[in-house]
Image (cartoon, rainbow, N blue to C red):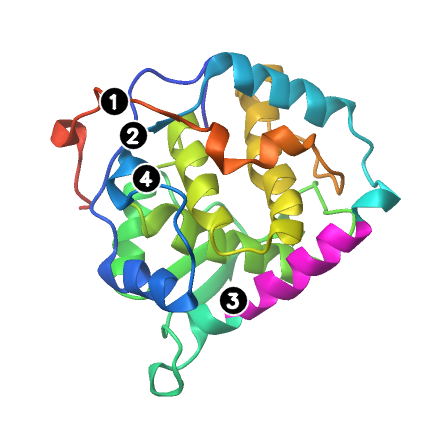
Amino acid sequence: MVSSASAPARTQLFTPVPYLVDGARRWGCLDPIAPDGYTRARLDPAVGAAIAAAYMAAPVRDPRAGAAYAAFRRETIRQYAYLVGRAEFGGLGVTVRIMDTDPYADAAAMIDDLVHRELKVFATAATDNPHPVLSNAENDMFRAVHDAFGHASIGRGFDGHGEEAAWLKHRSMYSPLAGRALATETRGQNCAMIFHYRGQRFAEQKAALLPRAFSDPRAVRLDRSAQRSDRSSPP
Protein backbone atom coordinates (compact mmCIF):
# COMPACT_ATOMS: atom_id res chain seq x y z
CA MET A 1 0.00 0.00 0.00
CA VAL A 2 1.31 3.44 -0.87
CA SER A 3 1.99 5.47 2.25
CA SER A 4 2.59 8.91 0.77
CA ALA A 5 0.13 11.58 -0.28
CA SER A 6 1.93 11.89 -3.61
CA ALA A 7 3.04 9.32 -6.16
CA PRO A 8 6.44 7.80 -5.29
CA ALA A 9 9.54 9.12 -7.01
CA ARG A 10 10.80 5.64 -7.86
CA THR A 11 8.88 2.72 -9.20
CA GLN A 12 9.31 -1.03 -9.28
CA LEU A 13 10.17 -2.66 -12.59
CA PHE A 14 10.24 -6.40 -13.17
CA THR A 15 10.74 -8.66 -16.15
CA PRO A 16 7.37 -9.00 -17.94
CA VAL A 17 6.01 -12.57 -17.91
CA PRO A 18 6.51 -13.78 -21.51
CA TYR A 19 3.38 -15.90 -21.94
CA LEU A 20 1.25 -13.02 -20.62
CA VAL A 21 2.92 -10.59 -23.03
CA ASP A 22 2.05 -13.00 -25.85
CA GLY A 23 -1.38 -13.68 -24.37
CA ALA A 24 -2.30 -9.99 -24.40
CA ARG A 25 -1.08 -9.78 -28.01
CA ARG A 26 -3.16 -12.81 -29.00
CA TRP A 27 -6.18 -11.22 -27.34
CA GLY A 28 -5.82 -8.53 -29.99
CA CYS A 29 -5.07 -5.55 -27.76
CA LEU A 30 -3.74 -2.45 -29.47
CA ASP A 31 -1.11 -0.84 -27.27
CA PRO A 32 -1.50 2.96 -27.13
CA ILE A 33 2.27 3.35 -26.69
CA ALA A 34 5.42 1.45 -27.64
CA PRO A 35 5.99 -1.63 -25.43
CA ASP A 36 8.92 0.00 -23.59
CA GLY A 37 6.71 2.98 -22.80
CA TYR A 38 5.06 1.08 -19.98
CA THR A 39 8.31 1.27 -18.02
CA ARG A 40 8.18 5.06 -18.30
CA ALA A 41 4.53 5.67 -17.38
CA ARG A 42 4.24 7.95 -14.37
CA LEU A 43 1.31 9.17 -12.28
CA ASP A 44 1.27 12.96 -12.37
CA PRO A 45 0.41 14.20 -8.84
CA ALA A 46 -1.84 17.01 -10.09
CA VAL A 47 -3.78 14.63 -12.33
CA GLY A 48 -3.92 12.02 -9.57
CA ALA A 49 -5.36 14.52 -7.10
CA ALA A 50 -8.01 15.59 -9.62
CA ILE A 51 -8.96 11.96 -10.31
CA ALA A 52 -9.21 11.33 -6.56
CA ALA A 53 -11.50 14.33 -6.11
CA ALA A 54 -13.74 13.16 -8.96
CA TYR A 55 -13.92 9.65 -7.53
CA MET A 56 -14.79 10.84 -4.03
CA ALA A 57 -17.51 13.12 -5.43
CA ALA A 58 -19.09 10.36 -7.52
CA PRO A 59 -22.15 8.45 -6.24
CA VAL A 60 -21.69 4.89 -5.08
CA ARG A 61 -24.00 3.65 -7.82
CA ASP A 62 -24.82 5.87 -10.77
CA PRO A 63 -27.54 4.54 -13.13
CA ARG A 64 -25.80 6.35 -16.00
CA ALA A 65 -22.87 3.93 -15.61
CA GLY A 66 -25.04 0.87 -16.26
CA ALA A 67 -24.09 0.27 -19.90
CA ALA A 68 -20.38 0.72 -19.23
CA TYR A 69 -20.44 -1.70 -16.31
CA ALA A 70 -22.47 -4.25 -18.26
CA ALA A 71 -19.79 -4.19 -20.98
CA PHE A 72 -17.04 -4.27 -18.36
CA ARG A 73 -18.59 -7.34 -16.69
CA ARG A 74 -18.94 -9.24 -19.98
CA GLU A 75 -15.42 -8.46 -21.14
CA THR A 76 -13.84 -9.25 -17.77
CA ILE A 77 -15.53 -12.67 -17.64
CA ARG A 78 -14.21 -13.41 -21.14
CA GLN A 79 -10.70 -12.37 -20.14
CA TYR A 80 -10.86 -14.55 -17.04
CA ALA A 81 -11.98 -17.57 -19.07
CA TYR A 82 -9.01 -16.95 -21.36
CA LEU A 83 -6.61 -16.63 -18.42
CA VAL A 84 -7.62 -19.88 -16.74
CA GLY A 85 -8.58 -21.85 -19.85
CA ARG A 86 -6.64 -24.94 -20.81
CA ALA A 87 -3.76 -24.32 -23.19
CA GLU A 88 -4.90 -26.98 -25.65
CA PHE A 89 -8.11 -25.01 -26.11
CA GLY A 90 -6.37 -21.66 -26.56
CA GLY A 91 -6.29 -20.53 -22.93
CA LEU A 92 -3.30 -19.53 -20.82
CA GLY A 93 -3.66 -22.28 -18.21
CA VAL A 94 -3.29 -20.14 -15.08
CA THR A 95 -4.55 -21.63 -11.82
CA VAL A 96 -6.29 -18.94 -9.75
CA ARG A 97 -6.87 -19.43 -6.04
CA ILE A 98 -9.16 -17.14 -4.04
CA MET A 99 -7.70 -16.48 -0.59
CA ASP A 100 -9.24 -15.28 2.67
CA THR A 101 -6.15 -13.21 3.51
CA ASP A 102 -3.98 -10.92 1.39
CA PRO A 103 -1.66 -13.44 -0.30
CA TYR A 104 1.23 -11.23 -1.37
CA ALA A 105 3.59 -8.97 0.52
CA ASP A 106 4.74 -7.37 -2.73
CA ALA A 107 4.45 -7.52 -6.49
CA ALA A 108 7.59 -9.63 -6.84
CA ALA A 109 5.89 -12.57 -5.12
CA MET A 110 2.83 -12.27 -7.32
CA ILE A 111 4.87 -12.09 -10.52
CA ASP A 112 6.94 -15.09 -9.42
CA ASP A 113 3.72 -17.08 -8.97
CA LEU A 114 2.50 -16.04 -12.41
CA VAL A 115 5.77 -17.16 -13.98
CA HIS A 116 4.68 -20.62 -12.80
CA ARG A 117 1.10 -20.05 -14.03
CA GLU A 118 -0.37 -19.63 -10.59
CA LEU A 119 -2.12 -16.61 -9.07
CA LYS A 120 -3.67 -15.94 -5.68
CA VAL A 121 -6.38 -13.32 -5.28
CA PHE A 122 -7.53 -11.71 -2.04
CA ALA A 123 -11.24 -12.56 -1.87
CA THR A 124 -13.72 -9.69 -2.06
CA ALA A 125 -15.87 -11.64 0.39
CA ALA A 126 -13.10 -11.41 2.98
CA THR A 127 -13.18 -7.61 2.97
CA ASP A 128 -15.77 -5.14 4.20
CA ASN A 129 -15.87 -3.44 0.81
CA PRO A 130 -18.36 -5.12 -1.56
CA HIS A 131 -18.84 -3.85 -5.08
CA PRO A 132 -22.19 -2.15 -5.74
CA VAL A 133 -22.90 -3.93 -9.06
CA LEU A 134 -20.38 -6.76 -9.51
CA SER A 135 -20.79 -10.00 -7.61
CA ASN A 136 -17.94 -11.07 -5.35
CA ALA A 137 -16.94 -13.69 -7.93
CA GLU A 138 -16.94 -11.15 -10.76
CA ASN A 139 -14.90 -8.71 -8.70
CA ASP A 140 -12.39 -11.48 -7.92
CA MET A 141 -12.19 -12.28 -11.64
CA PHE A 142 -11.31 -8.68 -12.35
CA ARG A 143 -8.60 -8.66 -9.70
CA ALA A 144 -7.09 -11.74 -11.33
CA VAL A 145 -7.07 -10.47 -14.90
CA HIS A 146 -5.81 -7.04 -13.84
CA ASP A 147 -2.89 -8.53 -11.91
CA ALA A 148 -2.03 -10.76 -14.86
CA PHE A 149 -2.64 -8.57 -17.89
CA GLY A 150 -2.22 -5.18 -16.24
CA HIS A 151 0.81 -5.72 -13.99
CA ALA A 152 2.62 -8.94 -14.86
CA SER A 153 2.45 -8.53 -18.64
CA ILE A 154 4.44 -5.28 -18.41
CA GLY A 155 6.49 -5.92 -15.27
CA ARG A 156 5.09 -3.13 -13.10
CA GLY A 157 4.42 -3.18 -9.37
CA PHE A 158 1.73 -1.83 -7.06
CA ASP A 159 3.16 1.64 -6.41
CA GLY A 160 1.31 4.65 -7.81
CA HIS A 161 3.30 4.74 -11.03
CA GLY A 162 2.94 0.99 -11.49
CA GLU A 163 -0.82 1.20 -11.09
CA GLU A 164 -0.92 3.96 -13.70
CA ALA A 165 1.04 1.80 -16.15
CA ALA A 166 -1.13 -1.25 -15.38
CA TRP A 167 -4.30 0.73 -16.08
CA LEU A 168 -2.81 1.97 -19.36
CA LYS A 169 -1.94 -1.57 -20.49
CA HIS A 170 -5.17 -3.20 -19.38
CA ARG A 171 -7.20 -0.44 -21.03
CA SER A 172 -6.00 -1.78 -24.38
CA MET A 173 -7.85 -5.06 -23.78
CA TYR A 174 -11.25 -3.43 -23.21
CA SER A 175 -13.71 -1.74 -25.54
CA PRO A 176 -14.05 2.06 -25.23
CA LEU A 177 -17.36 1.66 -23.36
CA ALA A 178 -16.01 -0.88 -20.86
CA GLY A 179 -12.87 1.25 -20.56
CA ARG A 180 -14.93 3.96 -18.84
CA ALA A 181 -15.72 1.51 -16.03
CA LEU A 182 -12.12 0.27 -15.97
CA ALA A 183 -10.91 3.81 -15.29
CA THR A 184 -13.15 3.99 -12.21
CA GLU A 185 -12.05 0.55 -11.00
CA THR A 186 -8.33 1.27 -11.36
CA ARG A 187 -7.37 4.92 -11.74
CA GLY A 188 -10.25 6.15 -9.60
CA GLN A 189 -9.78 3.77 -6.69
CA ASN A 190 -5.99 3.99 -6.68
CA CYS A 191 -5.88 7.77 -6.81
CA ALA A 192 -8.50 8.03 -4.05
CA MET A 193 -6.38 5.77 -1.85
CA ILE A 194 -3.16 7.67 -2.56
CA PHE A 195 -4.30 11.29 -2.63
CA HIS A 196 -7.47 11.31 -0.49
CA TYR A 197 -6.80 8.62 2.09
CA ARG A 198 -3.01 9.19 2.14
CA GLY A 199 -2.38 5.49 1.57
CA GLN A 200 -4.03 4.48 4.84
CA ARG A 201 -7.07 2.66 3.47
CA PHE A 202 -8.70 1.48 0.28
CA ALA A 203 -11.44 3.58 -1.24
CA GLU A 204 -15.06 2.48 -1.17
CA GLN A 205 -15.90 0.62 -4.37
CA LYS A 206 -18.23 2.49 -6.69
CA ALA A 207 -20.04 2.00 -9.99
CA ALA A 208 -19.84 5.45 -11.52
CA LEU A 209 -18.09 7.13 -14.42
CA LEU A 210 -15.20 9.57 -14.09
CA PRO A 211 -14.95 12.49 -16.52
CA ARG A 212 -13.95 11.22 -19.97
CA ALA A 213 -10.55 12.91 -19.79
CA PHE A 214 -9.58 10.54 -16.96
CA SER A 215 -10.20 7.44 -19.08
CA ASP A 216 -8.16 8.72 -22.04
CA PRO A 217 -4.85 6.79 -22.34
CA ARG A 218 -3.35 9.58 -24.44
CA ALA A 219 -3.08 11.76 -21.36
CA VAL A 220 -0.64 9.52 -19.46
CA ARG A 221 2.74 11.10 -18.69
CA LEU A 222 5.84 9.22 -19.87
CA ASP A 223 9.15 9.88 -18.13
CA ARG A 224 11.69 10.27 -20.92
CA SER A 225 14.63 9.96 -18.53
CA ALA A 226 13.53 6.67 -16.92
CA GLN A 227 16.16 3.95 -17.20
CA ARG A 228 15.87 0.21 -16.99
CA SER A 229 18.59 0.21 -14.35
CA ASP A 230 16.01 0.28 -11.58
CA ARG A 231 14.47 -2.98 -12.79
CA SER A 232 14.38 -5.71 -10.20
CA SER A 233 13.73 -9.37 -10.74
CA PRO A 234 11.27 -11.63 -8.99
CA PRO A 235 12.84 -13.93 -6.44
Residue 8 in view in this figure = yes
Dot 1 and dot 2 residues touching (CB under 8 Å): yes
Residue 129 at what x, y percent from top left? 70, 41
Dot 2 and dot 4 residues touching (CB under 8 Å): no
Label 1: how many residues lie within 10 Å, few (<14), some (14-19) or many (20+)? few
Dot 2 and dot 3 residues touching (CB under 8 Å): no
Q: Which mark is residue 215?
A: none
Q: Which mark is residue 224?
A: 1
- Which segment did they paint magenta? 66-80
Give how far apart the Cα atoms at labels 2 and 4 are: 10 Å
Q: Circle 2 sits on which residue?
A: 40
N-terminal of the two: label 2 or label 3?
Answer: 2
N-terminal of the two: label 3 or label 1?
Answer: 3
Residue 67 belongs to the span the image colors magenta: yes
N-terminal of the two: label 1 or label 4?
Answer: 4
Q: Secondary structure at mark 1?
A: loop
Residue 99 at what x, y percent from top left? 51, 56
Give how far apart the Cα atoms at labels 1 and 4 are: 17 Å
Residue 165 at what x, y percent from top left? 40, 36
- Inspect the image, locate mark 3, and give the three-letter code of the amino acid beneath it: Tyr
- Inspect the image, locate mark 4, and give the three-letter code of the amino acid beneath it: Arg
Give how far apart the Cα atoms at labels 3 and 4 are: 20 Å
Q: Which mark is residue 156?
A: 4
Label 3: how many residues lie within 10 Å, few (<14), some (14-19) or many (20+)? many
Q: Circle 3 sits on which residue?
A: 80
The extreme bottom residue here reads 88
Q: Identify which residue is drawn at 42% across, 67% down.
A: 27
Q: Identify which residue is drawn at 39% across, 49% down.
A: 31
N-terminal of the two: label 2 or label 4?
Answer: 2
Residue 164 at what x, y percent from top left? 45, 33
Q: Nearer the viewer, residue 209 or 198?
A: 209
